[in-house]
Amino acid sequence: MTLDLTLILELAALGLCTGFLAGLLGIGGGMVLVPFLTWMLGQRGIPADLAVKMAIATSMATILFTSVSSVRAHHKKGAVRWDLVKGLAPGIVLGSLVASLGIFAVVKGSSLAIFFGGFVGFSATQMFLDKKPAPTRQMPGFAGQLGAGGLIGMLSGLVGAGGGFISVPIMTWCNVAIHNAVATSSALGFPIALANVTGYVISGLSLQELPPYTFGYLWLPALVVIACCSVFMAPVGAATAHKLPVKQLKRVFACMLYLLAAYMLYKGLAA
C-alpha cells in the first residue's frame, strides 16, 4: 500500500468533514470515520477483516487529539463535572483494556462490522427522534460508577467511538444537566482513547500481515492527516451550529448514518 498524494487528499477531506460535523452536531468522529476508512483500506487491497479493525483503532486514536481541544473549551466554561470524571475513569480504563486487548483481538472483523452497524443504526434513531432521556435519578456511588465506566469503555473500544452516545444518556438519565453531561463526556474521551489505543497497539504488534505505515492496528498516515484536519475544522462547525437549525440537520445526518450502518452490516455479512 503506497502513500500517494491521492490518499493524503482523501484523508484530508475525510478529516475536514469529520471535524466540521463533530463541532456542528456534537458527535464523535467514529461513526463517520470507521465506514470510510474501512472502504479506503479495502480499495487498497487490505482484507476486509483486517480493514475493519484498523479503521476502528485509527478512529479511536484521533480522539486523543480532538478531545483535548474540546475539553479545554468546556473547562473554561466550568461545565466539566470532574468529580464524575474521577468516578467513571477507572471503570472506563478497565473496560477499554478488556475490549482492546481481549475481545478486539479475538473477535473477527466481520463480527465487529455487524456490531458497529447495529450501534450506528441505534444512534441514528436516537438522533433522528432527538430523544432526551428523562433526568429522574442521581449518579450511583463508586461501585455503580465503576460498572457504568466499564460499560462505556468496553462498548467504545469495540466500535472506535469516544463514548458520548453512551455516557451522555447515562449521565442525563441520572439527573446530570445536559450541558454538564456533554462537557464531561468530552473529558472522558481522553481516557477512553488512551486505554483503547494502548490495547490496539499491543494486540496488533504480533501480527505479520499488517501493511506498511502501521503501529499495531493503527494506520499512521490516516491518524496524522485526519487528526490535524479535524482539530482545525471542529471550531468552525461549532460556530456554524449557532447559525443553523441543528435539530433538522441532525435528522438529515441521521439518514446518512443509516446508509453508513447498512454499508458496515453489508461488509460484516459478506465477510
Image: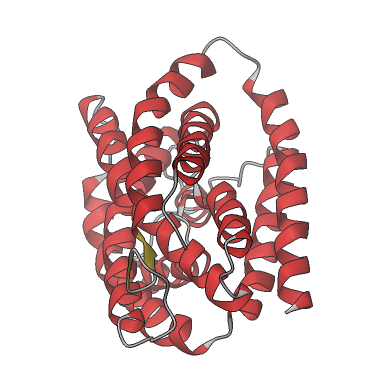
* Image position, residue 204 (x, y; %): 36, 80
Quarter of the image where one finds residue 19 = top left
* Image position, residue 33 (x, y; %): 53, 50
In this view, 66 is above or below 193: above
The total number of labels drawn is 0
At 50% across and 62% down in the image, what residue appears?
55
At 31% across and 71% down in the image, what residue appears?
91
In this view, 83 is above or below 192: above
Examine the rendering and report whether any part of residue 143 can be seen.
Answer: no
Colouring of the image: secondary structure
Residue 146 vs residue 188, the one in the foreground: 188
At 49% across and 46% down in the image, what residue appears?
7
Examine the rendering and report whether any part of residue 24 can be seen.
Answer: yes
In this view, 36 is above or below 264: above
Q: Quadrant of the C terminus?
A: bottom right
Quarter of the image where one finds residue 34 = bottom right
Residue 10 vs residue 32, the one in the foreground: 10
Question: Is residue 182 shown left or right of residue 109?
Answer: left
Residue 225 vs residue 120, the one in the foreground: 225
* Image position, residue 259 (x, y; %): 77, 49
At 58% across and 47% down in the image, what residue appears?
32
Residue 10 vs residue 105, the one in the foreground: 10
